[in-house]
Image: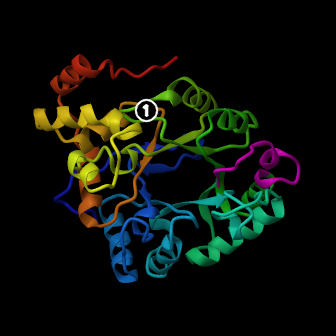
């Protein structure tokens, strides 16, 4: 039952999957110990609380610390039909299961099948709602006969996964994958937020035409657009005032001056783009989770956008 003290999180149809997902799916990186320690007990409680407030879509990966194991613990106590689970088939290197390391990843169908079957055991479920081929260095080996995508499609035929796709940044890779007609959903990252919106002209039109569901990573630029004190974070050495931090700095300053929540501005900006259905965020604790829900559920007044556009330019979404 949803927490009545919080607003109802909006949901959107994830393209042709017909899945109805919360606009801020839970990226399990949040409780994977990469951004701070989260005990098994706390992770399970966090997962249950997330479901209770409407964030019942969990997007997980082997490379997200030990978060899959923790989600698997929670799934021993949670009805499978209560959650949506998307996972990743990591293609970072030749390391075990394509994790971070050196060498060329194994792009074979056999490896994809074995990997997915192993993740089902780890998660204590008998099917996944989605599996994304994650960060391949090359796209062609994943698409060729006997390649990664073929393996996932075989798993789809067996009912082990409902929908398949890709999670990566390269726009040309996404376009090539969409063109196969076999992709149901995708995740782009770091290319649709307050700092840049380059997928508007490439991935989003192609995905919309093919009715491919779109999830968006880094809507808050890995914490830069959450409203944290950038001066303090720069001073303590967390970030340098360059790149995305430098680009976000004047927006942060403006929000401080105007008394506007940067987190709310960042998420509501992304929600203006209806061709993106989910903006995945990893929350470390209940406070972060609920702050994300409130920010995503509470539209900003028109006058805020008018002031923002006067300062930084148009926020109007391109549709062609």
Label 1 CA crowd tier, 10 Å (few <14, some 14–19, many 20+): some
Which one is in front, 73 or 190? 190
Residue shown at the point (58%, 31%) measured from the top left: 203
Residue shown at the point (28%, 49%) measured from the top left: 234
Kindly indicate the quadrant of the structure image that contains residue 264.
Answer: top left
Q: Is residue 111 something that shows in the picture?
A: yes
* Residue 298, x across and y down, in percent: 22, 42
With 300 as the anchor, is 64 left or right in this view? right
Span of residues in magenta:
133-149
Which one is in front, 223 or 272? 223
Which one is in front, 183 or 37? 37
Which one is in front, 185 or 217? 217
Q: Is residue 8 something that shows in the picture?
A: no
* Residue 156, x across and y down, in percent: 72, 58
Image: 286 above or below 229: below
* Residue 288, x across and y down, in percent: 27, 59
The number of numbered discs placed on residues in the rendered structure image is 1
Magenta-span inclusion, residue 292: no
Image: 240 above or below 309: below
Residue shown at the point (49%, 36%) measured from the top left: 191
Give the residue at mark 1.
274
Image: 237 above or below 302: below
Kindly indicate the quadrant of the structure image that contains residue 90.
Answer: bottom right
Residue shown at the point (32%, 36%) measured from the top left: 248
With 31 as the anchor, is 303 left or right in this view? left
Magenta-span inclusion, residue 135: yes
Residue reaching furthest to the right: 145
Q: How is the image coloured?
A: rainbow
């Amino acid at each position: 039952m949803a927490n009545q003290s919080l607003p109802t999180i909006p949901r959107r149809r994830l393209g042709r999957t017909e899945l109805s997902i919360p606009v801020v799916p839970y990226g399990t990186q949040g409780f994977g110990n990469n951004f701070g320690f989260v005990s098994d007990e706390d992770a399970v409680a966090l997962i249950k609380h997330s479901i209770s407030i409407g964030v019942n879509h969990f997007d997980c990966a082997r490379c997200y610390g030990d978060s899959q194991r923790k989600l698997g613990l929670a799934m021993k106590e949670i009805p499978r039909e209560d959650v949506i689970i998307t996972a990743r088939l990591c293609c970072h290197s030749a390391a075990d299961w394509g994790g971070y390391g050196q060498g060329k990843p194994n792009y074979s169908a056999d490896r994809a099948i074995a990997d997915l079957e192993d993740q089902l055991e780890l998660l204590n479920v008998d099917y996944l709602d989605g599996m994304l081929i994650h960060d391949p260095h090359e796209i062609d080996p994943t698409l060729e006969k006997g390649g990664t995508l073929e393996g996932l499609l075989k798993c789809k035929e067996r009912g082990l996964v409902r929908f398949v796709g890709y999670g990566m940044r390269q726009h040309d890779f996404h376009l090539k994958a969409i063109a196969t007609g076999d992709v149901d959903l995708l995740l782009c990252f770091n290319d649709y937020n307050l700092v840049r919106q380059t997928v508007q002209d490439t991935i989003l039109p192609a995905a919309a035409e093919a009715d491919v569901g779109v999830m968006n990573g880094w809507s808050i630029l890995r914490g830069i657009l959450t409203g944290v004190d950038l001066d303090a974070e720069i001073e303590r050495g967390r970030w340098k005032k360059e790149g995305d931090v430098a680009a976000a700095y004047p927006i942060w300053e403006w929000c401080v001056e105007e008394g506007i929540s940067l987190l709310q501005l960042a998420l509501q900006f992304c929600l203006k783009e209806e061709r993106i259905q989910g903006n995945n965020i990893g929350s470390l604790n209940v406070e972060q989770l609920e702050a994300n829900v409130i920010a995503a559920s509470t539209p900003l007044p028109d006058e805020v956008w008018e002031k923002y556009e006067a300062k930084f330019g148009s926020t109007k979404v391109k549709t062609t």
